[in-house]
Amino acid sequence: MDLVKLTEKQMKSRRNRNIALGLVLAGLVVLFYAITIVKIGGGMAG
C-alpha cells in the first residue's frame, strides 16, 4: 500500500492546523469547566 508523500510545506501546514485544533478543543474544555463551576457555585450560594 503506497502512502502519499507530503512535502515539507504540507507537513508543516498540517502540524500547525492540528495544533490550532488542539488549542480550540482545550479552550472549549476550559470554557465548559468554568461554566459548570459557576453554575454549581451559584446554586450553592443562592
Image (cartoon, helix red, strand yellow):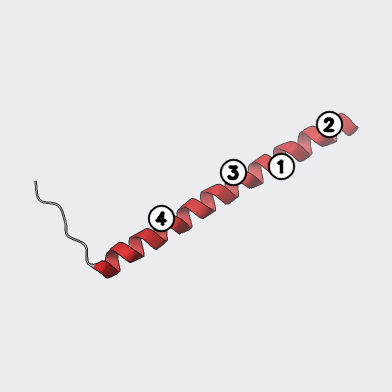
**First in sequence: mark 2 vs mark 3:** 3
Q: Would you say 29 lies left or right of 13 here?
A: right
Q: Position of residue 45 (x, y in %)?
A: 89, 33
Labelled disc at residue 18: 4
Q: Compared to 1, does 8 lie above or below? A: below
Q: SS class of the residue under badge 2?
A: helix
Q: Position of residue 6 (x, y in %)?
A: 21, 62
Q: Is residue 46 visible?
A: no
Q: Amino acid at mark 2?
A: Gly
Residue lying at the far left in this picture: please name it: 1
Residue lying at the far bottom in this picture: please name it: 9
Q: Position of residue 41 (x, y in %)?
A: 82, 35
CA distance separating discs 1 and 3: 10 Å
Q: Amino acid at mark 3?
A: Val
Name which residue lies at 28% across and 66% down: 10
CA distance separating discs 3 and 4: 17 Å
**First in sequence: mark 3 vs mark 4:** 4
